[in-house]
Amino acid sequence: MKNYTSINDIDNINTWIKEAREIKANPFENIDLGKNKTLGLLFFNSSLRTRLSTQKAALNLGMNPIVMNVSGDAWGIEFGDGTIMNGNTAEHIKEAAAVVSQYCNVIAVRAFPSLTDKEKDESEQVLKSFVKFASVPIVSMESATGHPLQGFTDAITIAENTTKKRPKVVLSWAPHIKALPHAVANSFTQAMQKMDVEFVITNPEGYNLSPDITKDTKIFHNQEEAFKNADFVYTKNWSSYDDYGKVLNTDPNWMITKEKLGTAKFMHCLPVRRNLIVEDAVLDSEASLVIEQSNNRTFAAQLVLSKILKEL
Amino acid sequence: MKNYTSINDIDNINTWIKEAREIKANPFENIDLGKNKTLGLLFFNSSLRTRLSTQKAALNLGMNPIVMNVSGDAWGIEFGDGTIMNGNTAEHIKEAAAVVSQYCNVIAVRAFPSLTDKEKDESEQVLKSFVKFASVPIVSMESATGHPLQGFTDAITIAENTTKKRPKVVLSWAPHIKALPHAVANSFTQAMQKMDVEFVITNPEGYNLSPDITKDTKIFHNQEEAFKNADFVYTKNWSSYDDYGKVLNTDPNWMITKEKLGTAKFMHCLPVRRNLIVEDAVLDSEASLVIEQSNNRTFAAQLVLSKILKEL
Amino acid sequence: MKNYTSINDIDNINTWIKEAREIKANPFENIDLGKNKTLGLLFFNSSLRTRLSTQKAALNLGMNPIVMNVSGDAWGIEFGDGTIMNGNTAEHIKEAAAVVSQYCNVIAVRAFPSLTDKEKDESEQVLKSFVKFASVPIVSMESATGHPLQGFTDAITIAENTTKKRPKVVLSWAPHIKALPHAVANSFTQAMQKMDVEFVITNPEGYNLSPDITKDTKIFHNQEEAFKNADFVYTKNWSSYDDYGKVLNTDPNWMITKEKLGTAKFMHCLPVRRNLIVEDAVLDSEASLVIEQSNNRTFAAQLVLSKILKEL
């Protein structure tokens, strides 16, 4: 594999899940695979799980991780083509990506969307510029429109925890006070569309995800109806896609409660705001898989890095 | 040992000192003990010595250190129970501590006090929340009320440098322009109370440390009297405990001078403000042990990590 | 070698170039040289190339790099002698340098000039204080007046790319909107003066570098004249040295164009502002050596660290 920037880079999700679970059972088996290899982790935005789990994955493979907070540690980066750089940016992505490629065998990048300019966000300027101008493989650690390490993690977690051959999985919007990206919801949707599950989405009117993502997945505006017979409820807030980046609805009735959840398992990518997205009673119960999801982040990243290292 | 959060976690300080000095004599002997193990260092506050010495200790044991500046790199953390998280905090400590436990085999935490709310500071909310919600051992890298890696370091340094069976050790307050925590003074006091030394404290009126810490240790408000026949003078500023967090006194007569020190050795945890806490003539003389103290931080941390790793 | 703080620390640049190219051909040959050794990288200023390439060099030698952003991670450092430290600085360089020496076998430091106080900048207070007060070797990662890892890198790159026994090398000033340091231009000049090249400098009037640096190197105020028969054009902006730190000229006619360059190779230390310093057509052409320069940073640093490690 060259790059991992989207759930679409997974050729066979069932094989990948099997391989990731083998890594989880024996995480240090390939400790020599990354010997003398360096993973650069470039953060344009904050990170806890991704920062730690991707480093841990690299270490499990014997790679040397080097972390950079791009904004704080280095220079403002210019992405425009042909720009006369007499403003605030000091280095062009053409040089930045090529230069980091001299020191790192793989580059992982996190860059969130603006949520103000849909077209720009959908162009995935930062991630695609790294793919274009770096001479080494690129891994997305969440970009404007996707979080494929999270989406694959969630697929692993469902496979580990299902008791049915074809479980029902619901992606439910939940309220939040800030405008949040669509990346996690998009990648989760794409991962579920590749798995043998009954997958539906529920969100208020005005909150449908991009039709390029949802495709023929059924969308309910009635949460209760969507939750019927659910085995897994994956919850996430996102801002409006149609009225791009806007918070149109903070209705607390969309919060996930123990009563609504019934016998379903609860999933969330974290960080999660308690008693806004989901009540304490859910997170503090056996029904919550959120910590195991965060654990699986390591093995999702480790499989991706393994596949890349094997083809270096 | 499970956690190291207080000098009280030291079962036998003389044995510990002996073991730490053995590590100092042969720091790489247990380079395989931490193989494939990760130490997470979480900083809610600034750090130089602790940041470097704890990483160095981990490296000497073959561990992989991962450093995070919590405030800058990640999300605001919520500690309240049952809070509706619609404010500035984005992740609850319940998740944060459990999640970091998925990636790190040991977690070290630094979190200073507010110095405005005595009850809250004494509750040690941050440190105790990590102990409660993490599934791996916790090491304090200085909390609201204690700095046990420093206190143990100081005990090692006194043992190395004493020429007497039972030296006289004085903890002396010194002036500072800012309100500083009690943590170092508290842990030093607790360490000295466990050692076979003659230990006294001297500070201006209104600056007595918590009676729960000082217990029956003699406190002098007359610095000169306290210093008589001293073998070691450990100096530190702290803000008032009774009038909590206030700077009541900046009297330069409490500064440590060569004349006052006599033949005693000078100790300070660093960073130290020259010519405010202590005059240049002391720090630049053979009497100063401050650099050796900083060196011993590595071996104090290394012993603590060794004890934890052996029981993982 | 004890310290590497200036191009003057290179005893024989041709031997060094040969040794660095051998390392480049076989970067992991000395992976055991730095075993159990720690490199502390202290940044008082931003960095991308230097941060990554110096870490990579350390890793290639089996060293453990520990990175610190001094301003963000630790305390304000005092450099004054005899200061009563009742202001914003919390730790004196005497302690800071000695303390870091306890944890790191080699210390690398980056500290830019003020560009407001020539005398202070030329005193190299930060770098020289580390040399004076640390007990371990010091490597400059760019100081007020020099960037010797870059200068040596550039010498390697010219040696690799020349087709002539004695190529003509031109250092050309180019316009920039901000006041930039002289460090890169100074070290490049010093490196070229040690090599068997025909070396000239071109810059507008009022922009001559320090005569202590340029010595008898010929300076042209006519860029076109200087460029005649050039094999390598090294470009860099710097602020005025005579009218210290001032931007006197932003004349776009000094920008490097494909036409001006002719058949010469283009060099720049990066980061470079496109279409201000140099037009896209140059950077995007085969004539540009800038990415190979950044690659060679690793091997320049690796040779310097090797020489230091061998004498530890």
Image: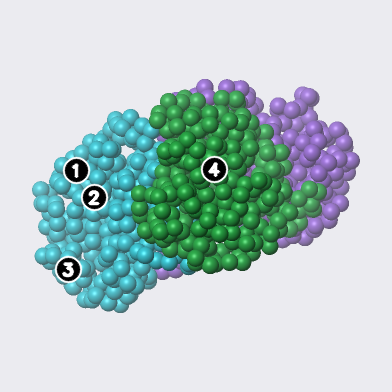
Chain colours: A purple, B green, C cyan
Residue at left 86%, top 47%? A222
Residue under circle 2? Answer: C152
Residue under circle 1? Answer: C16
Residue at left 46%, top 40%? B157
- Tell me the SS state at disc 4: strand
Q: CA distance from mark 3 to mark 1?
A: 26 Å
Q: Mark 1, residues whose alpha carbon is within 10 Å: few (<14), some, or many (≥20)? A: some
Q: Mark 2, residues whose alpha carbon is within 10 Å: few (<14), some, or many (≥20)? A: many
Q: Chain of mark 4?
A: B
Residue C302, by quadrant, is top left
Q: Position of residue B306 (x, y in %)?
A: 53, 29
Q: Chain of mark 2?
A: C
Compare marks 2 and 3 and give the one earlier in the sequence. 2
Q: Position of residue B288 (x, y in %)?
A: 40, 50
- Classify C169 as above or below B32: below
Q: Which mark is residue C211?
A: 3
Residue A161, by quadrant, is top right
Q: Amino acid at mark 4?
A: Glu
Rendered-image quadrant of the C terminus of chain B = top right
- Tell me the SS state at disc 3: helix
Q: Mark 3, residues whose alpha carbon is within 10 Å: few (<14), some, or many (≥20)? A: few
Please tell me whether mark 2 or mark 3 is closer to you in this view. 3
Q: Are marks 3 and 1 on the same chain?
A: yes
